[in-house]
Image (cartoon, coloured by chain):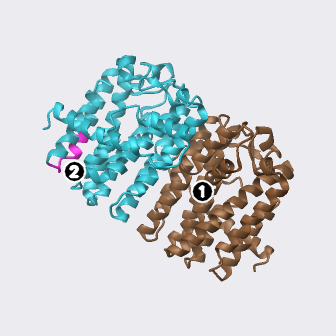
Chain colours: A cyan, B brown
């Protein structure tokens, strides 16, 4: 067992390493100043840096020093950030606020926001490919990440979300499948890539994949619940925006109580997937699974 | 010397191989039907498939069978296609017509067009990473391609283009630099990746890089000229749209005659860069350089 304060300290210190990397990831490259400013604006808007921390910690769980995957892990945050910028666009969710600040297209303009997203996504692949580890492991990890982020993963999930929004009455299976693509795939792949980069054996990769899938689901249900129960200041975006936008969520389909129960079950599944692992990294990841459903924002 | 009809036959037959690959590249993957339709709509809108043909032919020039890089090369066309979809968006060039058909956001909707672009870009990396050649060579090629497509390449060039549009009086150096990023980088990288995948030596990679850079510039100048002199039916988009949109182009800065001369010079530079190569592939690439400045559309 890792106590919650200790878990939070490690989460924050790894998050800070990621932020330090992200602050310099565009240096020494000839890109238009306005585009750079726009990319950094969203990269530096804060957040828990959960995906890169998962990648680093799963690498560490499999015996690879987490620093070795810091650039790769940070590149996953670049991909996550691009997805937020594009999701906020007027043609998509049309959100003016993100993490308490104007969303990218509000702070800059729509064209620059589209290009900042495109740039973050593409540049992430440059950074991932340059990971100084065994080329076959790196290649496998990059392919895994791209698959999770692409049309049969995150991008496809956003398309389903656009199709479902404002159409109440979709079933739990559609909701689960949409969210597994939209947020679950990248969270799971963040974990799996850590294991792949560490050249973990198949059984370990499978266990870590199961952990990531359950954690992703727990995280998303908790996110849906927070949108209902937290206030705007805590969320950094308008509270209740899911309901306003006509989004299908776990609380809208199941109610709050059943949603909370489901989130706890998934966190439990995530813990159970790591049963074969011992040591501080395993304890950290198990505590992180609990934290995803108990966090306040 | 390869006669022009023979060059065109090889260009077309390689282009057809690319189209056959692209027609099935999304099969057996669980993506939303509307997103798949939108991605295929733009992928199958035609075009010369110049970038993948360059990649295949440069691989062949360096001794690797062009079929070996067909998926990788086709993925470059996916990236080119994504860039056209995003460039046409209302917030960017706001073009309703592309290759004689409604542009993607007109045929579908803006959200789907943004996501189709995001999906094509990301999925291209899945395909590239799965190239069954030596992992170190594949990794180098993927990094090269991503660098060319990202914020210091194609995406950055589009940002400069947005900034310059409607502002007459930019200098030739700004125009050259913008276009080298916007269209030159991906054309050059298409050539270089063929060489890298074939594990060509440094001197060959450099020569092929020079060839690609000159060809890219020749191609872009020719494109600017065609926008002035060709008609809408031939172009598949409104003729004269550069002038209407207030784009800075070679003809707008230098006039038609000087632009034609510069294009011919660059084609000559491209031919010269391949001086050390003999055989049918070298002849094909040299003829292709001439074709880029003499084409009618």
Question: In terms of depth relative to the viewer, which is nearer, A171 or B201?
Answer: B201
Tell which subunit mark 2 falls on. A
Chain bearing tag 1 is B
Measuring from the top left, give residue A35's x and y in whole percent: 54, 39
Q: Depth check: B249 or B278 in front?
A: B249
Query: Residue at left 21%, top 38%?
Result: A10
CB within 8 Å, label 1 to label 2: no
Q: Is residue A105 magenta?
A: no
For the point 62% across and 80% down, the residue is B276
Looking at the image, residue A201 lies above or below residue B202: above
On the image, the x and y values in percent for residue A230 come to 35, 18
The residue sitting at 81% across, 57% down in the picture is B258
Q: Which residue is mark 2?
A: A61
Name the quarter where the C terminus of chain A is drawn: top left
Q: Secondary structure at mark 2?
A: helix
**Are discs 1 and 2 both within one chain?**
no
Q: Nearer the viewer, mark 1 or mark 2?
A: 1
Residue highlighted by disc 1: B185
Secondary structure, mark 1, is helix
Q: Is residue B154 visible?
A: yes
Q: Is residue B174 above or below residue B274?
A: above
Residue A61 relative to residue A97: left or right:
left
Q: Is residue B247 left or right of residue A53?
A: right
Question: Where are the magenta residues, as a range?
Answer: A269-278
Image height of B297 relative to B101, above or below: below
Q: Is residue A100 left or right of residue A210?
A: right
Answer whether residue B13 is visible to the viewer in this image. Answer: no
- Crowd around label 2: few <14 · some 14–19 · many ≥20 (10 Å): many
* Residue at 14% across, 47% down: A279
Residue B24's label in the rendered image is none
Left or right, A89 with respect to A143, comes to right
């Amino acid at each position: 067992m890792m106590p919650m304060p200790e878990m939070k300290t490690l989460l924050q210190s790894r998050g800070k390493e990621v932020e330090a990397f992200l602050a310099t990831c565009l240096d020494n490259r000839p890109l238009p100043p306005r585009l750079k400013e726009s990319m950094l604006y969203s990269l530096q808007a804060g957040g828990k840096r959960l995906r890169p921390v998962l990648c680093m910690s799963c690498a560490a769980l499999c015996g690879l020093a987490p620093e070795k995957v810091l650039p790769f892990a940070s590149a996953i945050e670049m991909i996550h950030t691009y997805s937020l910028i594009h999701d906020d666009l007027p043609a998509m969710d049309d959100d003016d606020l993100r993490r308490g600040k104007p969303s990218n297209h509000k702070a800059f303009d729509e064209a620059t926001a589209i290009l900042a997203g495109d740039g973050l996504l593409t540049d992430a692949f440059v950074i991932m490919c340059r990971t100084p580890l065994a080329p076959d492991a790196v290649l496998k990890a990059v392919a895994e990440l791209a698959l999770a982020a692409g049309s049969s993963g995150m991008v496809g999930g956003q398309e389903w979300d656009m199709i479902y929004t404002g159409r109440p009455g979709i079933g739990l299976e559609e909701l689960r499948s949409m969210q597994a693509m939209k947020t679950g795939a990248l969270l799971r792949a963040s974990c799996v890539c850590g294991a792949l980069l560490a050249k973990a054996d198949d059984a370990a990769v499978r266990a870590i994949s199961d952990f990531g899938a359950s954690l992703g689901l727990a995280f998303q249900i908790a996110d849906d619940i927070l949108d209902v129960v937290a206030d705007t200041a805590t969320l950094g975006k308008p509270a209740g925006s899911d309901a306003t936008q006509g989004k299908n969520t776990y609380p809208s389909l199941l109610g709050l109580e059943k949603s909370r129960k489901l989130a706890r079950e998934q966190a439990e599944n995530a813990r159970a997937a790591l049963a074969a692992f011992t040591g501080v990294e395993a304890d950290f990841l198990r505590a992180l699974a609990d934290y995803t459903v108990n966090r306040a924002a």
